[in-house]
Amino acid sequence: MRITAMGNWRPQPGMAVRFDPTEACREAASSTPDHPAPVTFLAQNHVRGAAVARAAGRTHRGYLGSGTEIDGDLDTAALGAALTLFVRRHEVLRTWFECRDGDVTAHLVDSADVDFEGRVDRRLETADDVHPYLIDRFDHETPSDAFPGFAFGAISRPGGFALFLACDHALSDGASQALALDEIAQIYLELIGAGDPDHATDAEPAPAVGGYFTYAAAEAESTAQHLAGSPQTRAWQEIFRRHDLQMPRFPLDLGLAAGDTAQVTGVEVSLLDGAGIAAFDAACRGAGGRFIDGIYAAIAITDRELAGADEYYGMTVFNTRAALDGYATSQGWFCTFAPVEFSLTTASTFAELIPAAHTARRRARDLATVPVAAALAAIAAAGATPDAIITAPNLLSYIDFRWFPGTSREAFRRGALFTGEGRTANASAWINRDHDELYLGSQIPGTPFAESVARHYYDHLRAVVADIARTGDRQIRGPAATPGPADPVAAAALRRGA
């Protein structure tokens, strides 16, 4: 499984097959009543934002997707049955949302009513036909204001087929996408007997997975507890007060005016190979930390050397699946965020910085127990302005794909994970590890100036990480000249995109 830009997943052309709810399923879904359970904060916020964007005529790009390759001729009926079983297992995929005057309510389709069937859509003649086809389907079919809030299909050729899924972000996250096609493929292979018709069977029921609405209720309860006051919410406030009540930003100027965004472009950087990973891990452990602590320290060193930062201040994505039993393989948006901060002024080497990074990461894990709604309320109570609160922070995500259940299976190994490509003012880093590579992906503003700055930053980070892996440590150097054209006229031209 690799996180990459959608355009980098390039399956071969063939016959496009789409899978949609049967008419009876669609009618049952449209008549489901309001569900009494709460909706998670992130889903509410996403659905509201999507409704505003849709009213303004903007294209929906708030989705996540994945694709893979399956060997053997496509059995359309079996794949439709596999999708049906998969959706029945996962409550959130049977959910659609309604936004009325800003209030978001959920509707849950009964599992017995879920039924999908496949049909030929059209032939994709060339590889260049595939990407526009996927974009069109994802843009139009993934909004979760109707069932289903996802697009699913296959591209069939003799001897094999590509498989793809894209879900509205209200229904999914990166881990869910990494799990989804592997699970569907496993059900499919069970149904067809892995190519041996004599051994085809009904798919075995999967282990029970946690339901979306149980999670939403637990989040609501935790939010109420933290809104009443907790050491963690007070720590959030203290951190934000130390940073002028502002969200973390990319450490270098990306050339956008306050409030501006630009269409994203993707950056991918290979940081370490397998041997380099082992050496970097040894350097981290030798300094008393873990691999992820070394990632924080390396980024902090880059901030110091390029931006002159005296401290690292960032916002990290945390997976919340471990908060409740039974959610390890559940589909849904199970994430939260927490600030990470530590000083750079008392360390002169990577090894000396590791203890501070380690302490900050552990503190952030504790702060991540605060649901997003309670954290934002705490920041507001500390005096943050509405504009500051709604500003999207520059994020850091770290995923270790070695621990996913499908890591040894072909559908997972061949998989690609991608997101819709909208607009951004940030250059958030998505750092991922598998058995062979540590790599980074980022969606940055697609302007010449922002690309110049962000690529320089990530190239420097790669050099820092490589230096640590090669030597076991690294001296922290003084701030370098700000990247980008030294000539103000050239810099202005790049900002304008000239």
Image (cartoon, rainbow, N blue to C red):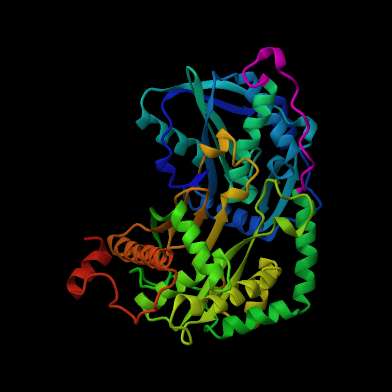
Q: In which quarter of the image is the C terminus?
A: bottom left
Asked if residue 254 is among those painted magenta in the image, a careful observer would answer no
Residue at 75%, 75% (x, y): give it.
227
Q: Can residue 439 be seen in this view?
A: no
Count of numbered circles in the view: 0
Asked if residue 197 is among those painted magenta in the image, a careful observer would answer yes
Question: Looking at the image, which is closer to me, 304 or 113?
Answer: 304
Main secondary-structure element of the magenta-colored stretch: loop
Query: Against 90, is 445 above or below?
Result: below
Whole-percent x, y for residue 364 in the image? 63, 72
Residue at 74%, 45% (x, y): give it.
107
User: What residue span does the magenta drawing correspond to?
Assistant: 192-211
Query: Against 91, is 247 above or below?
Result: below
Q: Is residue 73 visible?
A: yes
Query: Is residue 370 shown left or right of residue 463?
Result: right
- Quadrant of the rendered image containing residue 369: bottom right
Query: Is residue 491 shown left or right of residue 61?
Result: left
Residue at 21%, 74% (x, y): give it.
486
Whole-percent x, y for residue 38 in the image? 77, 56
Query: Against 423, is 188 above or below?
Result: above
Question: Looking at the image, which is closer to me, 325 or 250?
Answer: 325
Whole-percent x, y for residue 96 in the image? 68, 44
Residue at 77%, 63% (x, y): give it.
220
Question: Looking at the image, which is closer to me, 497 or 30?
Answer: 497
Question: Looking at the image, which is closer to me, 55 or 94?
Answer: 94
Whole-percent x, y for residue 297 in the image? 49, 72
Query: Is residue 17 shown left or right of residue 211?
Result: left
- Quadrant of the rendered image containing residue 456: bottom left
